Amino acid sequence: MKLNQPKVSEQLTPATFQDVWLEEDPYLQNCVVLDSRFDGEMVERAQLTNMLVKNSSFQHASLPDLFITDVRFENCDFSNADLRGVSIHRASFHNCKMLGVNFADARFTDVLFEQCIGNLSAFVHAKWERVLFEQCQLKDADFFDCKLKQTKFSMCNLDSASFDETSLKGVELRSSEFESMTVSMKDLEGCIVSVRQAVQFAAMMGLDIRDE
């Protein structure tokens, strides 16, 4: 699966979130944000375009309907943030903390999550296309009623993740690991798994598997 990479300029102007997000129409573009903190703050319908964001914190922030295009996040902390209705296009998250993030009703297109910690995050009713989770921790994550197109979980920990009411047709899990997972037999149809995972799923569905 090939993702369209973020189109981030080499020449970016230094900025902070506080400079712009207090405006009536919060909008940041063509800039780099370093070591900024927005913990516990609230901004609606903010827009981020053509940016690099590094070493910044959004813990417990409320950012409903956030719009992100062509942004690279590095070493950022979104733990317990409210990102309901976020739209993310051509963006990447590297070594970011996303514990307990609310991604309900989110939209993702061409998004990479690399070495991120997303345990207990909720992707309820999310819709996405061309999304790659690579070496991420997603224990107890909730993917209820999601629409997943061209999705790959590469070398991720998906233990106790829930895919209730979510079709996994075409979704690749084969290099990831889990001890248990919530998913129905009908939603597993067409999922790309390893032989070991196939045995795990069969056992989870109640089959009595025995060697001859």
Image: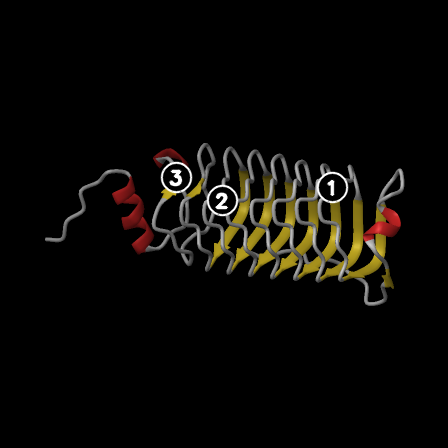
- The image shows residue 49 at horizontal and vertical percentages of 80, 51
- The image shows residue 197 at horizontal and vertical percentages of 33, 52
Q: In this view, does 64 lie above or below 1?
A: above
Q: Which of 71 and 150 is in front in this view?
A: 71
The amino acid sitting under disc 1 is Leu
Q: Nearer the viewer, residue 192 or 144?
A: 144
Local crowd size for mark 2, using a 10 Å CA cut-off: few (<14), some (14–19), many (≥20) = many
* Circle 3: element type: strand
CA gap between label 1 and label 2 equals: 21 Å
The amino acid sitting under disc 3 is Thr
Residue under pointer 2: 141
The amino acid sitting under disc 2 is Ala
Q: Is residue 211 above or below residue 60?
A: below
- The image shows residue 90 at horizontal and vertical percentages of 70, 52
Which residue is farthest left?
Answer: 212
Residue under pointer 1: 66
Please tell me in which quadrant of the rendered image residue 86 appears. top right
Residue 182's label in the rendered image is: 3
Instruction: Identify the residue at image location x=75%, y=43%.
Output: 41
Whichever of callouts 1 and 3 sits on the residue coming sooner in the sequence is: 1
